[in-house]
Amino acid sequence: MKSLLELVYKLLKIKFSRTPNQNTRMKKILFYHLQMLGGVYVKFLQALCNNYNFTKGWVGPTELAVFKNVSLENIDVAEHVSLDNFLWLEQAPFASGSFAQVYKGQLRTGELVAVKILRPSVKRTIRRDIKLIKIISRIMRRFLPIDIVDIKAAADEFCNACRLEIDYRREINNLEFFYEMYKNRDEVVIPKVYKLLSSASVITQDFIAGQTLADVLTLKKHHQNSAELVLETTGSDLWAQMAILGAELCHMAMQEECVFADPHPGNVILLPKNRIALIDFGIVSSPPTSRKAFYDWVFEYHRNLNGNKDVDKLMIATLRCFSPALAQAFANYQAFNGQSVLEVLGDTFNDRMGSFGENSLANELFVGGHLFQLYYKVLDKNNALGLKLDINNFQLLKAIQTYLSMIYILDREGDGTSFAKCLNLSMENALSRVGAFGIADDSEIEVSLPESYAILSDALSSLAERDEFLFNKLLGRI
């Protein structure tokens, strides 16, 4: 409780001061407070750092060490694994996360393995920690602006995921699934899991040598960027590796039964020959509500990246993908000119873009390829439409934000053009692969007229309160 009071005092002190950049200063206070608490709070902090809006403009290599440097816990390895199965097993971990510590060893059959052991302290304190994180999220909600994903909802989802993550049997099954998916693919490596040597608190899997992206971000020398370090140490093109990761995330969402939903820097190992390895499958996502809607969103995003400035089509595709009930409700009603209200909404997005100058933040985001940010930070500021995401779309959105945040941080080290190039290559790859097989049209959902009216009414009320410009433009055309 004392820790919470200290956090509130520091936030209030900033809130009622006249210092500039208050939101950034509050984020820093929160960052270092959670880092100080350690354990599950660091994992929650990692989730926050995966969000572009949380990290923008202030997070550097020192802060990104949160994905790598976690304090060690004294664990007696022999209490958790049978040493009879190993030729040798190191007693000191080579990697330490907020939930687990990882030890290198060699099986009697010759394989080099990584043994991931759940921290005993996590199991002891998880219930208390979850309650405290929910309280912290409510505090954050009071001080930081509302985003498209409500911070309380994000904390609730995080806490639910924590409960699942402390039982490794689910992650073991996830590892088997993804290993089978990629076992015949050269560019993506998934470690093999040894199920008979694993349990609810231990995972034994192949050891994969290499630096994680978190290592690269924190180890690069002064005036050296991450791409130069990766080329020097592995001979690989970092941006080609990031494009592979982006393409795989898109392709999984379009055609696979499961999506790798935790692509943060500590879970991506950079290998020679432009390959990557993915580790830690405690957090996965189901496919989006509609694969076709997701495909259409990627298609429109890709078109805009290639110079087709059709903001209206992109914004409609974004709504259909991530908030299908709201999009369908808007589509169910006709405006006076014969357009659906959804189409009118798309036109008003174009009007909003036109209201900004050529040097505005909106155009900077557009030119730089940050079109998702353009949607929910500029065109739909403060979640003006009151979007509510179902759990599948929320988890997928979180994974996308994590990936976008990574390549945004890397892009800041260069000339500012690699972000858009990487996305373009990722989407082009995924779209071409799906195009070869086709995709079923599962985008239509049923929303009755009474339901549509209620959704439309709520959205317009929210719009009137939070974005007067967009509300007046939309109302004038309906």
Image: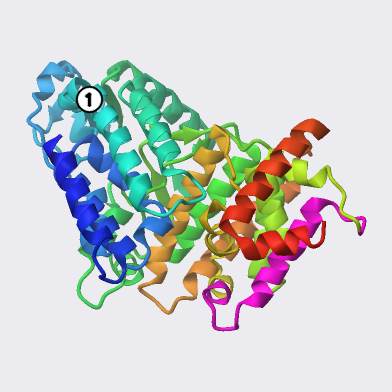
Locate residue 109 relative to residue 387 in the image: left or right: left
Residue 314, relative to residue 447: is it above or below?
A: below
Q: Is 376 left or right of 197, judged from the image as shown? A: right
Q: Amino acid at mark 1?
A: Arg
- State the residue at coordinates (38%, 66%): 410
Which residue is rendered at x = 45% and y = 76% of the image?
A: 416
Residue underneath mark 1: 128
Question: Where residue 476 appears, x then y in whole percent?
Answer: 79, 62
Work out whether residue 282 or residue 140 is closer to the camera in this orientation and state it: 140
Residue 440 is situated, as x and y percent measured from the top left of the image, at 77, 38
Does residue 308 appear in the picture of this structure? yes
Q: Disc 1 on helix, strand or loop?
A: helix
Magenta span dominant secondary structure: helix
Q: Residue at x 23, y 60 (%)?
A: 14
Percent coordinates x, y for residue 182 in the rendering: 51, 39
Say above or below: 420 vs 40.
Answer: below
From this view, report whether residue 319 is shown above or below residue 354.
above
Height in image: 398 above or below 314? above
Q: Does residue 353 show up magenta in the picture?
A: yes
Residue 385, image x, y percentages: 62, 50
Q: Is residue 327 left or right of residue 58?
A: right
> Is 412 situated left or right of 465 in this image?
left
Task: Report crowding for label 1: few under 14, some 14 to 19, many 20 or more residues within 10 A (C-alpha).
Answer: few
Quadrant of residue 229 in the image?
bottom left
Viewer-proximal residue among 96 and 30: 30
Which residues lie in the magenta part? 337-364
Q: Single out the residue that lies furthest toward the bottom.
A: 358
Q: Is residue 344 magenta?
A: yes
